[in-house]
Image (tube, rainbow, N blue to C red):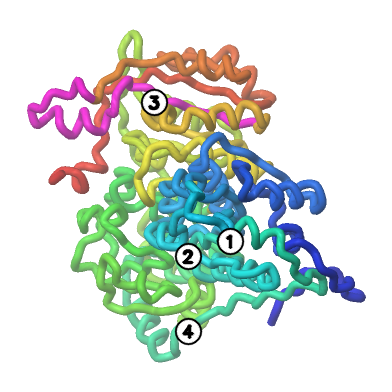
């Protein structure tokens, strides 16, 4: 089955146009209703035509890494192919960190990049081997060879991004952009196929599930999608199972009282208590990496494991399953439910021995460590969780505070938690937050970053302020690269080289036209911030002077040997 993306009726007349105009028209037809860019000679005409002739919305960034991060955040929040464009040469090389993050996170992006003229000379300072550069990030690449083939290669790049679930860079040389190609006549895309494991494997899985007394259904981002979430939830209810998620899957089972939250290093005390009692784990759309299992400290190595994933490479990448089911998350979950037959949520008896309010209570016992001039970062997030409206979109930059965001700030649905940790690079949070805010306009957007991450992409604070989207930016300012302080300080190493002192981030936000407040105590979140929260408009920055003594516990098992 195919999707036809033109209205019914007579197809428009085929005509000739410059390749950049034809590609602009095609991208709009494919569904690109917003494009993120930083413009130069290699992409100016393409974006100008997308915006002026095809009604595509436009968001700009101050740095090319911000361009790709915006599209990445948008795609994660919407589940659709994100579209962005870059200038050739340094425009592409500037974006490499964000491109690698998107590739590692399996985000479907189409990144259109200019290139040096095919008829140019070696005097072109911006000429590099762009294809080799892109492949090193893990992204795919397609090159438009001639104007006549521009639409075929653009369509192929789009389909690859969607089906391979990674960025695909479309290289469009400047002179080729001006060559003519034939356009018009409609666009047809293949319908994504749905795979289901063979019946023998499903029956073996059903037998294991029927015998389990305390099953746990643990789902990740591979379980996102139309129908998949409901099917996985129905399977868990049929088994009387408890639910848990990976960090990237946060929000998947937000409406179920039987969800214990995130598994692994970010697990709550209640999650650790209950996950440890599981006698079978069904992993759906997750790779069970060391963060999710905390190197087998949360999910023991001896617990039987069934994995469901439509990517064979993901089935045994970190933990070898007892039974691997290669198939679509939703279709496989539905097939297992059908084999198990009716039974309700008391099939195993686990839920009958538990109180739902006990399961859903995370069991935190927090003792805050602020001072007269600083606030505990956990207190900031707990208070914001209580204050912020729902639905909400929560985006994190990288930094040592990310676990506290995952632990203490709730979200109401999948795709509402944008966790930019695949490459663990500082400096992508603000741009990802703007993209996510554009992608979910009805949800309240919050971006959490640290002082180090904010300074790495300070230009995107201007992008946020100038473009007017209502976004809350929360800065955890401990005046240092706190992760290094806590890693090397206890070893007796001096840490003065990574301690810089705090800065006036509130003043910077105000200078850019936003509103801001300095937070040293919970009371500082009243006043101007409370007024803005009642009717959010434009940028508001909370400059939180956090106590650097507060230690995170989740990274010790990963970084302890560094």
Looking at the image, tell me whether mark 3 or mark 2 is earlier in sequence order. 2
The C terminus lies in which quarter of the figure? top left
Which residue occupies 38% across, 76% down?
312
Q: Nearer the viewer, mark 1 or mark 3?
A: 1
Q: Nearer the viewer, mark 4 or mark 3?
A: 3
Residue 480 location, x and y as percent? 29, 24
Helix, strand or loop at label 1? It is loop
Q: Nearer the viewer, mark 3 or mark 2?
A: 2
Q: CA distance from mark 1 to mark 4?
A: 62 Å
Helix, strand or loop at label 4? It is helix
Which residue occupies 19% across, 68% down?
302
Whether residue 24 is situated above or below residue 554 in the rendered picture = below
Looking at the image, tell me whether mark 1 or mark 2 is earlier in sequence order. 1
Q: Which mark is residue 339?
A: 4
Residue that mark 3 sits on: 451
Q: CA distance from mark 4 to mark 3?
A: 53 Å
Q: Which mark is residue 140?
A: 2
Residue 84 location, x and y as percent? 60, 51
Which residues lie in the magenta part? 470-497
Q: CA distance from mark 1 to mark 2?
A: 25 Å
Q: Nearer the viewer, mark 2 or mark 4?
A: 2
Helix, strand or loop at label 2? It is strand
Contact, mark 1 vs mark 3 (Cβ under 8 Å): no
Contact, mark 2 vs mark 4 (Cβ under 8 Å): no
Tell me: 412 left or right of 377: right
Residue that mark 1 sits on: 119
């Amino acid at each position: 089955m195919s999707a036809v993306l033109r209205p019914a009726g007579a197809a428009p007349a085929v005509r000739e146009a410059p390749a950049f105009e034809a590609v602009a028209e095609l991208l709009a037809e494919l569904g690109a209703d917003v494009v993120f860019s930083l413009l130069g000679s290699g992409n100016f005409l393409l974006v100008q035509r997308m915006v002026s002739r095809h009604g595509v919305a436009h968001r700009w960034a101050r740095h090319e890494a911000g361009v790709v991060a915006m599209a990445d955040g948008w795609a994660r929040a919407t589940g659709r192919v994100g579209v962005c464009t870059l200038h050739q040469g340094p425009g592409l090389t500037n974006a490499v960190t964000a491109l690698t993050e998107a590739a590692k996170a399996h985000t479907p992006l189409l990144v259109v990049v200019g290139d040096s003229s095919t008829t140019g000379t070696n005097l072109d300072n911006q000429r590099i081997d762009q294809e080799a550069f892109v492949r090193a990030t893990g992204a795919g690449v397609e090159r438009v060879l001639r104007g006549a083939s521009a639409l075929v290669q653009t369509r192929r790049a789009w389909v690859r991004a969607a089906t391979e679930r990674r960025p695909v860079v479309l290289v469009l040389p400047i002179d080729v952009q001006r060559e003519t190609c034939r356009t018009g006549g409609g666009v047809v895309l293949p319908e994504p196929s749905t795979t289901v494991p063979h019946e023998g494997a499903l029956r073996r899985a059903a037998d294991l599930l029927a015998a389990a007394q305390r099953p746990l259904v643990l789902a990740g981002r591979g379980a996102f999608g139309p129908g998949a979430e409901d099917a996985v939830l129905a399977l868990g209810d049929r088994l009387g199972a408890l639910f848990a998620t990976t960090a990237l899957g946060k929000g998947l089972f937000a409406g179920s009282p039987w969800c214990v939250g995130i598994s692994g290093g970010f697990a709550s005390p209640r999650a650790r208590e209950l996950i440890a009692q599981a006698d079978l784990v069904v992993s759906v759309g997750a790779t069970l990496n060391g963060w999710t299992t905390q190197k087998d400290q949360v999910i023991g190595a001896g617990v039987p494991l069934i994995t469901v994933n439509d990517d064979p490479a993901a089935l045994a990448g970190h933990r070898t399953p007892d039974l691997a089911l290669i198939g679509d998350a939703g279709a496989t979950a539905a097939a297992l439910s059908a084999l198990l037959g009716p039974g309700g949520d008391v099939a195993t008896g686990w839920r009958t021995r538990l109180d739902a309010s006990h399961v859903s209570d995370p069991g935190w016992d927090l003792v805050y460590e602020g001072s007269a001039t600083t606030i505990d970062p956990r207190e900031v997030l707990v208070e914001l969780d209580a204050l912020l409206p729902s639905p909400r979109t929560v985006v994190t930059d990288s930094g040592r505070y990310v676990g506290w965001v995952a632990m203490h700030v709730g979200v109401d649905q999948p795709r509402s938690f944008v966790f930019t940790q695949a490459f663990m690079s500082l400096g992508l949070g603000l741009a990802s937050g703007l993209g996510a805010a554009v992608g979910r306009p009805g949800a309240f957007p919050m971006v959490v970053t640290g002082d180090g991450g904010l300074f790495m992409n300070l230009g995107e604070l201007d992008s946020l302020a100038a473009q007017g989207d209502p976004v809350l930016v929360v800065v955890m300012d401990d005046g240092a690269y706190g992760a290094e302080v806590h890693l090397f300080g206890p070893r007796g190493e001096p840490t003065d080289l990574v301690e810089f002192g705090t800065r006036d981030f509130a003043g910077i936000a105000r200078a850019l036209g936003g509103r801001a407040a300095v937070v040293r105590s919970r009371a500082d979140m009243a006043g101007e911030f409370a007024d803005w929260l009642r009717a959010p408009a434009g940028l508001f920055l909370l400059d939180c002077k956090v106590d650097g003594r507060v230690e995170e516990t989740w990274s010790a098992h990963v970084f302890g040997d560094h």
